[in-house]
Amino acid sequence: MSEDLLPRTVRALLEVQTTARPEALYALALDAGDANAQSPSSVTDAAFLKPPQGCEGTAHASASMGPANLRTEGDAGESAAPNPVSISFAALSHYCGQVATLFKGQGLQPGDTVSLVMPNGLNTLRLLLGAMHGGWCVNPVNLLSSPEQMRYVLEHGDCKLVIASSDWAERVQAVLATLTRPVGLLVCSPDMDADDSLLGSLQPTPMPEPQAEAMALLMYTSGTTGVPKGVVLTQSNLAANAMAISAEHRLGARDRVLAVLPLYHINAFAVTMLAPLAHGGSLAMPPKFSAARFWQQALQAQCTWINVVPTMISYLLEGTAPKGESLGHIRFCRSASAALPPAHLQAFEQRFGIGVIETMGLTETVAPSFSNPYEPTLRKLGSVGQASGCEACVIDAQLHPVPDGTTGEIAIRGPQVMQGYYKNPEATRASFTPNGWLRTGDLGHRDTDGFFFVTGRIKELIIKGGENIAPREIDEVLLRHPSVLDAAATGMPDAHYGQEIMVCIVLREDCAADAVALRAFCHEHLGRYKTPKVFHFVQDLPRGPSGKVQRLKLLDWVAQA
């Protein structure tokens, strides 16, 4: 298709599917079942903030992606769960018109921002999509935010309306009472079939097509240092990466993803919610991630691919594997949002027989900007893959490209790259090179095959005696020790070297290792210079809302422990 004819808005993506396959399934709700049982395998959205679990895998199966046993086109998946609630493309289009009626009734005009403080659910999904369909900007608020962070986001983001689930309503009301402007609040269930879903029998209101460059999503970064930054993403940014994701993973109308990641995170927002609009596939959404029910849900819903983060992989490795060839129809597992230790990737493939496609992206790039290939034999262990839907290069401190194999800062340019940070021109200028490349802040190199390898973050780099040391290299060596469950290294002030190396260690249950043993292990695998000077043994590590270790907070965190 000519680039001039490609959909450039979320609404245009939906209209393609509504025209071609109006009654085809787009989204299916899965019952919570026993996911709420008091069990260590049943966890909330905070699941991907927990320390990684063990990676032992005993059962061996092929990790390649074989032919899928796919359902026939048009199958709405009625047998996927008891009393499922589902949405077709035609129904979604109708709901989007109802959302427009709701917002117009609240006095909102296209271009206004609406914040959502809601967990996953089909009602959450249709409110998000309905807002963007009608030309409004959505601001999904991270449910792991502190009250101070939530207040900042709602104040700084200039929202005109907040929609909150009932369990969040009181807390949100308290935050709104402290803002410097009046903001409306609506309360509803995240579930589509609830009595308080807000849409009810509203008649749909036709709305003009949003402009491709209109702001569609305002999503705040986790604020690892300083206050969160609001990432401005347009309709065309979202549409471009939805199509790129679909093409990269060869997704089609018969594909269905198990949507367990929270919609307030860019990974779920783009990969599991928007991408199916581009390829005409579908998603199956349980209320939350449950390691105990994950495989049962994937099988019942006839999912053909799964999208998870590394900590979820760790939980699944700790659980039981389905017997026989029951997972043969799942073509691949996509991992993103944080680095996946190579040992965990290999253990997952060996245990479950599902190939893992490791990817990498940013909120600033609508999630993925790198992906390993679809073909298993072409993937490279430890690499985030090749540029996906964009251009990528490696630059030096003077912002000049460096040769392949040379470490520098990874930079990206393409149609999914953000417009900038909301009301923060200084941060926007600092994030782009003069010729328009987004500076990711990630250190790494590109090999001669075009694969990128990330070694750390510029701000997290340890400079010991003038030598640059990537803390991730130390982490990955320690994770190979049989007693180490999790590890995170950082720099600490030193009178002689400027910085020395400190590492925080989480030991496996019923395992013993002391600093002497781990220091000897590091000497063997890292050499004396990169061996940490200080070992702290802790119960867990500080993590941000996306699940990444907050490495720059380790020193203060240890001091307060």
Image: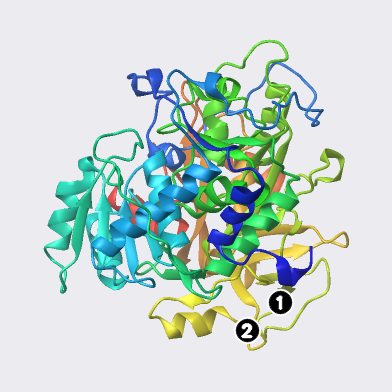
The tag on residue 433 is 2
| Residue 364 percent location from the top left of the image | 54, 66
Q: Is residue 191 left or right of residue 310?
A: left
Q: Residue furthest top?
A: 324
Q: Is residue 264 visible?
A: no
Q: Is residue 218 visible?
A: yes
| Front residue (pair 127, 389) | 127
| Vertical relation: 93 (above or below) 132 | above
| Vertical relation: 444 (above or below) 322 | below
Residue at image coords 34%, 23%: 36
The earlier-in-sequence mark between 1 and 2 is 1
Q: Which residue is mark 1?
A: 395
| Residue 489 percent location from the top left of the image | 52, 52
Within-10-Å neighbours for mark 2: few <14, some 14–19, many 20+: some
| Front residue (pair 464, 432) | 432
For the residues labelled 1 and 2, say whether their Cβ atoms are less than 8 Å apart. Answer: yes
Mark 1 or mark 2, which is nearer to you?
2
Residue at image coords 17%, 50%: 171
| Residue type indicated by callout 1 | Ile
| Residue type indicated by callout 2 | Thr
Residue at image coords 39%, 58%: 553
> Hey, which quadrant is residue 59 in on the image?
top right
